[in-house]
Image (spheres, rainbow, N blue to C red):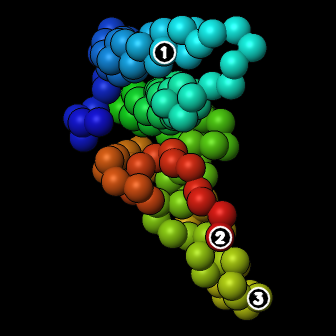
Amino acid sequence: MSKKQIKTVDELIDKLDNELAWRKKEIIQANLLISSNVENTPLSFTQKSSILIIYANWEGFINKAANYYAMFVFSQNIPLIFLKTGFLEIKLQQKRYFDDLMISKKQVVRKRFLDNLNKELYSKDIPRFEDTLGKRYIYQRIQT
């Protein structure tokens, strides 16, 4: 995924189309492999693996599409106060404001969080996207 901003709907559609195109090819190939199975016989290891590839491609597309959409919305320079709270969470998470808040019960930490929250609500500072796990706008968190 590029670090370039996505400023127009056409750019967003192009990114989504490109992302979906190569995934569709893999999904079709995997689906053909699975559908070649003889009725009433167990799926082979390769066919079972194809099911995982289909799932991974779909999940990967949803993840990339969500990130592209966030890139598009952030590039519009709309103050966060006018966006849904999910966008505020993305920005606050990137700046790690929640980290101190979650581990501390001190009033000063809560006040600092609320001060930062108030500042961010009216900010037009766009979060920067990085295509590495943990740096994306939206990524699947692995529970340990």
Mark with earlier residue (1, 3) = 1
Residue on which the image places disc 3: 105
Nearer to us in this view, 96 or 143: 143
Residue on which the image places disc 1: 33
Q: Which mark is residue 81?
A: none
Residue placed at 63% from the left, 25% from the top?
43
Determine the secondary structure under disc 1: helix
Q: Is residue 86 above or below residue 8?
A: below
Q: Is residue 34 rendered to the left or right of residue 123? A: right
Residue placed at 50% from the left, 53% from the top?
91
Quadrant holding the C terminus:
bottom right
Q: Quadrant of residue 6?
A: top left
Residue on which the image places disc 2: 144
The residue most toward the bottom is: 106
Q: Give the crowd class for mark 2: few <14, some 14-19, many >=20 residues within 10 Å.
A: few
Determine the secondary structure under disc 3: loop
Hey, what amino acid is under mark 1? Leu
Nearer to us in this view, 41 or 140: 41
- Residue 28 visible, this orientation: yes
Hey, what amino acid is under mark 2? Thr
Residue placed at 70% from the left, 77% from the top?
102
Mark with earlier residue (2, 1) = 1
Hey, what amino acid is under mark 3? Lys
